[in-house]
Image (tube, rainbow, N blue to C red):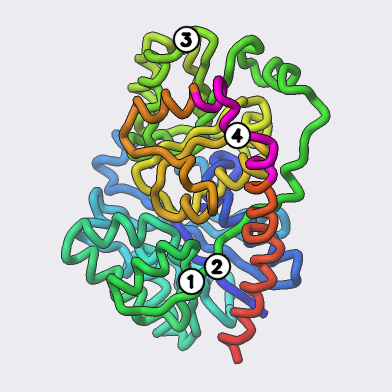
Amino acid sequence: MKVLWITSAYPSDSQPGSGVFHETQVQALHRLGVDVTVICPIPRSPAFIRPFRNGDKANQNIPSKYERKGVMVYRPYYLAIPGQLRWAQPDKRIAEVIMKTMSDYDLAPDLIHAHFAMPSGGAARIIAEKKKLPWILTLHGSDVNVYPYYSSIAKKAFLQSVTTADSVLAVTGHLQTKTKELAGRDSSVLPIGIDLSQFQQPELTKQQMRRHLGLPEDKKMITFVGRLTGAKGVFELAQALDFLSNEFAIVFVGDGPAKEKLTRNPEFNSRLFITGQVNNEKVRDYLFASDVFALPSYTEGMPTVVIEAIALKIPVICTAVGGVPELFGEHRDLLIETKSVSSLVQRIHDIFNRNLYTPRILQDFYEHIQKNYHAHTNAIQLKEIYRKQLN
Protein backbone atom coordinates (compact mmCIF):
# COMPACT_ATOMS: atom_id res chain seq x y z
CA MET A 1 0.00 0.00 0.00
CA LYS A 2 1.63 3.24 -1.21
CA VAL A 3 0.24 6.47 0.22
CA LEU A 4 1.22 10.00 -0.74
CA TRP A 5 0.82 12.51 2.07
CA ILE A 6 0.36 16.11 0.93
CA THR A 7 0.74 18.68 3.66
CA SER A 8 1.87 22.26 4.18
CA ALA A 9 4.00 21.52 7.26
CA TYR A 10 6.56 18.81 7.98
CA PRO A 11 9.77 18.73 10.06
CA SER A 12 13.24 19.22 8.61
CA ASP A 13 16.65 19.63 10.21
CA SER A 14 16.38 23.42 10.01
CA GLN A 15 12.72 23.49 11.16
CA PRO A 16 12.38 20.51 13.51
CA GLY A 17 9.20 21.80 15.15
CA SER A 18 7.17 22.31 11.97
CA GLY A 19 4.29 19.86 11.58
CA VAL A 20 5.58 17.40 14.17
CA PHE A 21 2.09 15.94 14.56
CA HIS A 22 2.18 14.91 10.88
CA GLU A 23 5.48 13.12 11.31
CA THR A 24 4.22 11.34 14.43
CA GLN A 25 1.34 9.81 12.47
CA VAL A 26 3.50 9.06 9.42
CA GLN A 27 5.98 7.22 11.62
CA ALA A 28 3.18 5.22 13.25
CA LEU A 29 1.92 4.22 9.80
CA HIS A 30 5.47 3.42 8.70
CA ARG A 31 5.85 1.03 11.64
CA LEU A 32 2.64 -0.71 10.51
CA GLY A 33 4.16 -1.36 7.10
CA VAL A 34 2.42 1.42 5.15
CA ASP A 35 4.69 2.87 2.44
CA VAL A 36 4.24 6.62 3.01
CA THR A 37 5.89 9.34 0.91
CA VAL A 38 5.51 12.98 1.94
CA ILE A 39 5.38 15.97 -0.39
CA CYS A 40 5.36 19.24 1.50
CA PRO A 41 5.69 22.12 -0.99
CA ILE A 42 7.49 25.26 0.15
CA PRO A 43 5.98 28.69 -0.61
CA ARG A 44 8.38 31.12 -2.27
CA SER A 45 7.49 34.77 -2.79
CA PRO A 46 8.12 36.64 -6.05
CA ALA A 47 11.82 37.49 -6.40
CA PHE A 48 11.41 41.25 -5.87
CA ILE A 49 9.95 40.83 -2.35
CA ARG A 50 11.77 37.65 -1.33
CA PRO A 51 14.67 39.42 0.47
CA PHE A 52 12.22 41.21 2.75
CA ARG A 53 10.20 38.21 3.94
CA ASN A 54 11.45 36.22 6.93
CA GLY A 55 9.59 33.10 5.83
CA ASP A 56 11.50 32.95 2.56
CA LYS A 57 14.80 33.38 4.41
CA ALA A 58 13.97 30.57 6.81
CA ASN A 59 12.83 28.19 4.06
CA GLN A 60 15.93 28.55 1.91
CA ASN A 61 17.82 26.06 4.10
CA ILE A 62 15.32 23.24 3.57
CA PRO A 63 16.60 20.67 1.04
CA SER A 64 14.35 19.72 -1.87
CA LYS A 65 14.58 16.03 -0.95
CA TYR A 66 15.59 14.21 2.21
CA GLU A 67 15.00 11.00 4.10
CA ARG A 68 13.74 11.40 7.65
CA LYS A 69 13.39 8.38 9.93
CA GLY A 70 12.99 6.04 6.97
CA VAL A 71 10.44 8.19 5.10
CA MET A 72 11.19 10.12 1.90
CA VAL A 73 10.18 13.77 2.03
CA TYR A 74 10.06 16.06 -1.02
CA ARG A 75 9.97 19.87 -0.68
CA PRO A 76 9.46 21.54 -4.09
CA TYR A 77 9.07 25.31 -4.29
CA TYR A 78 5.94 26.96 -5.61
CA LEU A 79 5.19 30.62 -6.26
CA ALA A 80 3.32 32.11 -3.30
CA ILE A 81 1.44 35.39 -3.52
CA PRO A 82 1.01 37.38 -0.29
CA GLY A 83 -2.50 36.88 1.06
CA GLN A 84 -3.11 33.99 -1.35
CA LEU A 85 -5.40 32.04 0.99
CA ARG A 86 -7.77 35.00 0.90
CA TRP A 87 -7.83 35.99 -2.75
CA ALA A 88 -5.64 33.83 -5.00
CA GLN A 89 -5.78 30.18 -4.03
CA PRO A 90 -2.46 28.45 -4.87
CA ASP A 91 -3.97 25.01 -5.44
CA LYS A 92 -3.09 24.87 -9.15
CA ARG A 93 0.48 26.07 -8.55
CA ILE A 94 0.96 23.53 -5.75
CA ALA A 95 -0.58 20.72 -7.82
CA GLU A 96 1.79 21.53 -10.67
CA VAL A 97 4.97 21.21 -8.57
CA ILE A 98 3.68 18.06 -6.85
CA MET A 99 2.94 16.37 -10.17
CA LYS A 100 6.37 17.36 -11.45
CA THR A 101 7.92 15.83 -8.34
CA MET A 102 5.90 12.66 -8.86
CA SER A 103 7.13 12.48 -12.45
CA ASP A 104 10.78 13.30 -11.64
CA TYR A 105 11.01 10.62 -8.95
CA ASP A 106 8.64 8.03 -10.46
CA LEU A 107 6.23 8.23 -7.54
CA ALA A 108 3.17 6.06 -8.16
CA PRO A 109 0.96 6.08 -5.06
CA ASP A 110 -2.20 4.03 -4.68
CA LEU A 111 -3.90 6.77 -2.69
CA ILE A 112 -3.49 10.43 -1.71
CA HIS A 113 -3.99 11.71 1.82
CA ALA A 114 -4.14 15.51 2.02
CA HIS A 115 -4.04 17.57 5.20
CA PHE A 116 -5.94 20.85 5.57
CA ALA A 117 -8.72 21.66 3.10
CA MET A 118 -6.68 24.52 1.70
CA PRO A 119 -4.22 24.73 0.13
CA SER A 120 -3.21 21.04 0.26
CA GLY A 121 -6.75 19.74 -0.24
CA GLY A 122 -7.24 21.92 -3.30
CA ALA A 123 -4.02 20.62 -4.84
CA ALA A 124 -4.91 17.00 -4.00
CA ARG A 125 -8.28 17.42 -5.70
CA ILE A 126 -6.59 18.43 -8.96
CA ILE A 127 -3.94 15.71 -8.79
CA ALA A 128 -6.43 12.96 -7.91
CA GLU A 129 -8.61 13.91 -10.85
CA LYS A 130 -5.74 13.90 -13.33
CA LYS A 131 -4.09 10.75 -11.97
CA LYS A 132 -7.38 8.91 -11.40
CA LEU A 133 -6.49 8.26 -7.76
CA PRO A 134 -8.71 8.08 -4.66
CA TRP A 135 -8.00 10.75 -2.07
CA ILE A 136 -8.70 11.36 1.59
CA LEU A 137 -8.84 14.75 3.28
CA THR A 138 -8.12 15.41 6.96
CA LEU A 139 -9.43 18.66 8.46
CA HIS A 140 -7.33 20.08 11.29
CA GLY A 141 -8.91 23.30 12.55
CA SER A 142 -7.99 26.57 10.87
CA ASP A 143 -9.11 25.18 7.52
CA VAL A 144 -12.63 24.95 8.95
CA ASN A 145 -12.71 27.64 11.64
CA VAL A 146 -10.75 30.43 9.92
CA TYR A 147 -9.94 30.11 6.20
CA PRO A 148 -13.48 29.75 4.78
CA TYR A 149 -14.41 33.11 6.29
CA TYR A 150 -11.64 35.06 4.58
CA SER A 151 -13.60 35.66 1.37
CA SER A 152 -16.05 34.10 -1.08
CA ILE A 153 -13.06 32.74 -3.01
CA ALA A 154 -11.73 31.06 0.13
CA LYS A 155 -15.15 29.63 0.96
CA LYS A 156 -15.44 28.20 -2.56
CA ALA A 157 -12.01 26.55 -2.27
CA PHE A 158 -12.99 24.99 1.06
CA LEU A 159 -16.25 23.62 -0.33
CA GLN A 160 -14.54 22.19 -3.43
CA SER A 161 -12.06 20.25 -1.31
CA VAL A 162 -14.55 18.96 1.22
CA THR A 163 -17.25 17.92 -1.25
CA THR A 164 -14.98 16.17 -3.77
CA ALA A 165 -12.74 14.13 -1.44
CA ASP A 166 -13.54 10.42 -1.42
CA SER A 167 -13.41 10.42 2.38
CA VAL A 168 -13.21 13.25 4.90
CA LEU A 169 -11.71 12.94 8.37
CA ALA A 170 -11.88 15.53 11.14
CA VAL A 171 -9.51 15.57 14.11
CA THR A 172 -12.31 16.60 16.50
CA GLY A 173 -16.05 16.22 16.83
CA HIS A 174 -16.33 20.00 16.81
CA LEU A 175 -14.78 20.14 13.32
CA GLN A 176 -17.04 17.31 12.19
CA THR A 177 -20.13 19.28 13.21
CA LYS A 178 -18.82 22.53 11.74
CA THR A 179 -18.01 20.84 8.41
CA LYS A 180 -21.51 19.43 8.20
CA GLU A 181 -22.93 22.91 8.81
CA LEU A 182 -20.69 24.61 6.23
CA ALA A 183 -20.60 22.01 3.47
CA GLY A 184 -23.32 19.47 4.20
CA ARG A 185 -20.62 16.81 4.12
CA ASP A 186 -20.42 13.94 6.58
CA SER A 187 -17.00 13.12 8.00
CA SER A 188 -15.45 10.71 10.47
CA VAL A 189 -13.59 11.75 13.61
CA LEU A 190 -10.00 10.52 13.84
CA PRO A 191 -7.51 12.55 15.85
CA ILE A 192 -3.87 12.58 14.88
CA GLY A 193 -2.44 11.23 18.09
CA ILE A 194 0.97 11.36 19.70
CA ASP A 195 3.50 8.66 20.45
CA LEU A 196 2.73 8.42 24.15
CA SER A 197 5.61 6.01 24.68
CA GLN A 198 7.94 8.99 24.20
CA PHE A 199 6.43 10.90 27.11
CA GLN A 200 7.70 9.03 30.12
CA GLN A 201 9.10 10.72 33.21
CA PRO A 202 12.83 11.44 32.60
CA GLU A 203 15.57 10.48 35.01
CA LEU A 204 16.44 14.12 35.79
CA THR A 205 14.57 16.02 38.47
CA LYS A 206 12.65 19.16 37.51
CA GLN A 207 15.42 21.37 38.91
CA GLN A 208 18.12 19.40 37.08
CA MET A 209 16.17 19.70 33.84
CA ARG A 210 15.85 23.47 34.28
CA ARG A 211 19.58 23.73 34.91
CA HIS A 212 20.17 21.74 31.72
CA LEU A 213 17.86 24.07 29.74
CA GLY A 214 19.21 27.28 31.28
CA LEU A 215 15.96 28.15 33.06
CA PRO A 216 15.65 29.56 36.59
CA GLU A 217 15.43 26.84 39.20
CA ASP A 218 13.72 28.95 41.86
CA LYS A 219 10.68 30.14 39.86
CA LYS A 220 7.19 28.78 39.38
CA MET A 221 7.51 28.09 35.67
CA ILE A 222 4.65 28.47 33.17
CA THR A 223 5.40 27.12 29.68
CA PHE A 224 3.87 27.91 26.30
CA VAL A 225 4.68 25.77 23.24
CA GLY A 226 3.60 26.77 19.75
CA ARG A 227 3.84 29.39 17.06
CA LEU A 228 4.29 32.84 18.54
CA THR A 229 1.29 34.72 17.17
CA GLY A 230 -1.35 36.95 18.73
CA ALA A 231 -4.03 34.36 17.95
CA LYS A 232 -2.27 31.90 20.27
CA GLY A 233 -2.84 34.28 23.19
CA VAL A 234 0.86 34.93 23.74
CA PHE A 235 0.40 38.61 24.54
CA GLU A 236 -2.25 37.92 27.17
CA LEU A 237 0.07 35.34 28.71
CA ALA A 238 2.96 37.80 28.75
CA GLN A 239 0.72 40.48 30.29
CA ALA A 240 -0.21 38.07 33.07
CA LEU A 241 3.29 38.59 34.48
CA ASP A 242 2.22 42.12 35.47
CA PHE A 243 -0.26 40.58 37.93
CA LEU A 244 1.93 37.75 39.21
CA SER A 245 4.60 37.99 41.86
CA ASN A 246 8.31 37.74 41.06
CA GLU A 247 8.28 34.04 41.94
CA PHE A 248 6.58 33.33 38.58
CA ALA A 249 8.27 33.09 35.18
CA ILE A 250 7.07 32.23 31.65
CA VAL A 251 8.99 30.45 28.89
CA PHE A 252 7.77 30.63 25.28
CA VAL A 253 8.95 27.62 23.28
CA GLY A 254 8.63 28.42 19.58
CA ASP A 255 9.05 31.12 17.01
CA GLY A 256 6.82 33.44 15.01
CA PRO A 257 5.86 37.02 14.20
CA ALA A 258 5.08 37.92 17.83
CA LYS A 259 8.61 37.13 18.97
CA GLU A 260 10.01 40.61 18.38
CA LYS A 261 7.24 42.31 20.36
CA LEU A 262 7.57 39.81 23.19
CA THR A 263 11.29 40.54 23.50
CA ARG A 264 10.40 44.18 24.22
CA ASN A 265 8.60 43.11 27.39
CA PRO A 266 10.44 44.63 30.39
CA GLU A 267 10.56 41.16 31.99
CA PHE A 268 12.41 39.64 29.01
CA ASN A 269 15.39 37.53 30.14
CA SER A 270 14.45 37.90 33.80
CA ARG A 271 10.96 36.36 34.05
CA LEU A 272 10.07 35.96 30.35
CA PHE A 273 12.15 33.62 28.21
CA ILE A 274 11.96 32.70 24.50
CA THR A 275 13.72 29.58 23.23
CA GLY A 276 13.04 29.76 19.50
CA GLN A 277 11.98 26.66 17.61
CA VAL A 278 13.19 23.37 19.08
CA ASN A 279 12.82 19.71 18.10
CA ASN A 280 10.08 17.59 19.62
CA GLU A 281 12.43 15.75 21.98
CA LYS A 282 13.43 19.07 23.52
CA VAL A 283 9.78 20.20 23.71
CA ARG A 284 9.28 17.25 26.03
CA ASP A 285 12.15 18.50 28.21
CA TYR A 286 10.65 21.99 28.48
CA LEU A 287 7.26 20.53 29.38
CA PHE A 288 8.78 18.37 32.08
CA ALA A 289 10.69 21.36 33.49
CA SER A 290 7.48 23.39 33.84
CA ASP A 291 4.96 23.58 36.66
CA VAL A 292 2.08 24.56 34.36
CA PHE A 293 1.48 24.46 30.61
CA ALA A 294 -0.60 27.31 29.11
CA LEU A 295 -2.17 27.60 25.65
CA PRO A 296 -4.65 30.53 25.71
CA SER A 297 -5.47 30.38 21.98
CA TYR A 298 -8.34 32.17 20.25
CA THR A 299 -8.93 29.17 17.96
CA GLU A 300 -7.61 25.60 17.84
CA GLY A 301 -8.19 22.28 16.14
CA MET A 302 -6.75 19.51 18.30
CA PRO A 303 -3.49 20.85 19.80
CA THR A 304 -1.18 17.87 20.22
CA VAL A 305 1.07 19.73 22.65
CA VAL A 306 -1.80 19.74 25.17
CA ILE A 307 -1.95 15.95 24.87
CA GLU A 308 1.82 15.84 25.42
CA ALA A 309 1.57 17.96 28.58
CA ILE A 310 -1.25 15.75 29.89
CA ALA A 311 0.88 12.67 29.15
CA LEU A 312 3.47 14.09 31.56
CA LYS A 313 0.70 14.85 34.11
CA ILE A 314 1.35 18.59 34.04
CA PRO A 315 -1.54 20.96 34.89
CA VAL A 316 -2.76 22.70 31.73
CA ILE A 317 -4.47 26.04 31.19
CA CYS A 318 -6.45 26.25 27.96
CA THR A 319 -9.27 28.24 26.44
CA ALA A 320 -12.59 26.64 25.52
CA VAL A 321 -11.99 26.62 21.75
CA GLY A 322 -12.08 24.04 18.94
CA GLY A 323 -11.47 20.48 20.05
CA VAL A 324 -9.96 21.41 23.42
CA PRO A 325 -13.20 20.75 25.37
CA GLU A 326 -13.14 17.20 23.98
CA LEU A 327 -9.67 16.75 25.46
CA PHE A 328 -10.86 17.97 28.85
CA GLY A 329 -13.96 15.75 28.82
CA GLU A 330 -15.77 15.83 32.14
CA HIS A 331 -13.32 18.44 33.42
CA ARG A 332 -14.09 21.06 30.77
CA ASP A 333 -15.17 23.47 33.52
CA LEU A 334 -11.42 24.01 34.02
CA LEU A 335 -11.20 25.84 30.67
CA ILE A 336 -10.93 29.63 30.66
CA GLU A 337 -12.16 32.53 28.51
CA THR A 338 -10.28 33.68 25.42
CA LYS A 339 -8.51 37.05 25.31
CA SER A 340 -8.73 37.40 29.09
CA VAL A 341 -5.64 38.23 31.13
CA SER A 342 -7.69 38.14 34.33
CA SER A 343 -8.91 34.59 33.60
CA LEU A 344 -5.33 33.49 33.03
CA VAL A 345 -4.11 35.06 36.25
CA GLN A 346 -6.99 33.61 38.25
CA ARG A 347 -6.42 30.10 36.88
CA ILE A 348 -2.69 30.31 37.65
CA HIS A 349 -3.49 31.29 41.23
CA ASP A 350 -6.08 28.49 41.43
CA ILE A 351 -3.51 25.91 40.43
CA PHE A 352 -0.80 27.05 42.81
CA ASN A 353 -2.88 28.19 45.77
CA ARG A 354 -5.96 25.93 45.66
CA ASN A 355 -4.43 22.68 44.36
CA LEU A 356 -6.94 22.78 41.50
CA TYR A 357 -5.33 19.87 39.65
CA THR A 358 -5.52 17.03 42.13
CA PRO A 359 -3.69 13.75 41.43
CA ARG A 360 -7.10 12.21 40.62
CA ILE A 361 -7.86 14.84 37.97
CA LEU A 362 -4.40 14.49 36.41
CA GLN A 363 -4.90 10.72 36.29
CA ASP A 364 -8.34 11.15 34.67
CA PHE A 365 -6.76 13.30 31.94
CA TYR A 366 -3.96 10.78 31.46
CA GLU A 367 -6.31 7.81 31.08
CA HIS A 368 -8.49 9.77 28.64
CA ILE A 369 -5.63 10.50 26.24
CA GLN A 370 -4.23 6.98 26.53
CA LYS A 371 -7.58 5.67 25.35
CA ASN A 372 -8.27 8.17 22.55
CA TYR A 373 -5.10 9.91 21.35
CA HIS A 374 -2.36 7.31 21.03
CA ALA A 375 -0.69 7.56 17.59
CA HIS A 376 -0.30 3.79 17.26
CA THR A 377 -3.98 3.10 17.93
CA ASN A 378 -5.06 5.85 15.56
CA ALA A 379 -2.65 4.63 12.86
CA ILE A 380 -4.29 1.20 12.96
CA GLN A 381 -7.64 2.87 12.32
CA LEU A 382 -6.18 5.04 9.56
CA LYS A 383 -4.61 2.04 7.82
CA GLU A 384 -8.01 0.36 7.83
CA ILE A 385 -9.57 3.50 6.30
CA TYR A 386 -6.93 3.35 3.54
CA ARG A 387 -7.67 -0.33 2.93
CA LYS A 388 -11.42 0.25 2.64
CA GLN A 389 -10.89 3.21 0.33
CA LEU A 390 -8.67 1.18 -1.99
CA ASN A 391 -11.17 -1.66 -2.04
What whole-number distance in Å separates the C-alpha atoms at marks 2 and 1? 6 Å
> Which of marks 2 and 4 precedes in the sequence?
2
Nearest to the observer: residue 82 or residue 183: 183
Element marked by disc 2 = loop
- Residue 375 within the segment the image draws in magenta: no
Image point (68%, 60%), residue name: 371
Q: Residue at x 40, y 53 (%)?
A: 322
**Comes first in the chain, label 3 or label 1:** 1
Instruction: Looking at the picture, tell me which residue is in the foreground, 55 or 275.
Output: 275
Report the amino acid beneath label 3.
Ser
Label 4 vs label 1: CA separation? Answer: 33 Å
Q: Which residue is mark 1?
A: 169
Mark 3, mark 2: which one is toward the viewer? 3
- Residue extending farthest to the front is 354
Asked if residue 74 is positioned above or below residue 296 in the image, the reply reads below
Q: Are marks 2 and 1 in contact (CB under 8 Å)?
A: yes
Q: Amino acid at mark 2?
A: Leu
Write down the region rendered in magenta: 350-363
- Residue 69's spot in the image, x, y percent? 71, 54
- Residues at marks 4 and 3 touching, judged by CB atoms closer than 8 Å: no
Measured in 3D between alpha carbons, the distance from the residue under mark 4 to the one under mark 2, in whole angstroms, is 28 Å
Corner quadrant of residue 41? bottom left
Query: Which residue has dot 2 on it?
Result: 190
Query: Which residue, given by chain and number where applicable, does mark 3 sit on?
Result: 245
Kindly give the residue lying farthest to the left in the view shown: 152
Marks 3/1 in contact by CB < 8 Å: the verdict is: no
Element under label 4? loop
From the image, state whether disc 4 or disc 3 is nearer to you.
4
Is residue 179 visible in the rendered structure shown here? yes
Q: Amino acid at mark 1?
A: Leu
Looking at marks 3 and 2 on the same chain, the residue that comes earlier in the sequence is marked by 2
